[in-house]
Image (cartoon, rainbow, N blue to C red):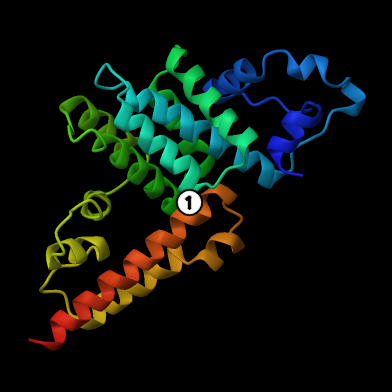
Amino acid sequence: MSWTGKLFGGGLGFVLGGPIGAIIGAVVGNQFDRTADNSSRQKLNQQERLNMVFFTTTFSMLAKFAQADGNVSRSEIDVVDSFVKNDLRLESNTRQLAINIFDQAKKSNSSFEDFARQFYTHFRNEKTLLISMIDLLIKVAIADSNFDQKERKYLKKAKKIFSISDSEYESILARYNQTDSLDKYFKILEVSPDTSMEEIKRQYKKKAKDFHPDNVIGKGLPDEYREFAQNKFKEIQKAYQKIKEYKKEY
């Protein structure tokens, strides 16, 4: 049974602290008290706990980020909705939970940085997961075709909190370059046209390993993250193939 099943089915003998705990507590209300007595409460295992943290923090950060320009636009909501349906592929009750978390976070006194710090506390050793969060925030930022200064400021805050390097950040941004350019593919692999093919291959292998779906599963990362990792893995493969073709010509 997943953590959401335990949440909906009988209360949890587990209380999450910090801004994330406040959000999930507000969303479920008194369900913790009325659905089960202390002796029958179910407990989360470590994997379920990570899934809960990832899920709650993701939608809380998205809510605060969407408010960065003072208005949550229809296009931003559509991006979040697409993420829920197409990337996470959530069931209807879990989709509703995501919506409730998003709405509750918009009203929360906790800041974007508060949620980002708690996310980093739990996933500081999973760089690929931190990168995926930056990627999602960028996707929301450009959704309304108005990547404004306040959104850029929030992204810089997240970049700093997550200890994301400049080259890693440029690699993420390159995904959203609509042109099929070599510059885009070099940035995705964090290399340059002058980098040797040997070094490019080494960088490719490192990135491919980080985002390989089997590796994600083996490391016990949140279930909801796997779809993103698979798409990123395909993108890395494409970048490597494009660069190889370019290098063969010169």
Tag 1 secondary structure:
loop
Image quadrant in which the N terminus is located: top right
Decide if residue 163 is in sight here: no
Q: Determine the residue positioned at 33% across, 67% down.
A: 236
Image quadrant in which the C terminus is located: bottom left
Q: Determine the residue positioned at 81% across, 15% down.
A: 34
Q: Determine the residue positioned at 59% across, 50% down.
A: 223
In the rendered image, residue 228, in percent from the top left (x then y), is placed at 44, 54
Horizontally, residue 225 falls left or right of residue 68, namely: right
In the rendered image, residue 120, in percent from the top left (x then y), is placed at 46, 38
Decide if residue 43 is in sight here: yes
In the rendered image, residue 243, in percent from the top left (x then y), is placed at 20, 76
Q: Quadrant of residue 24?
A: top right
Task: Look at mark 1 in the image and give the residue it sits on.
Answer: 126
Residue 195 in the image: above or below residue 219: below
Residue 181 in the image: above or below residue 7: below
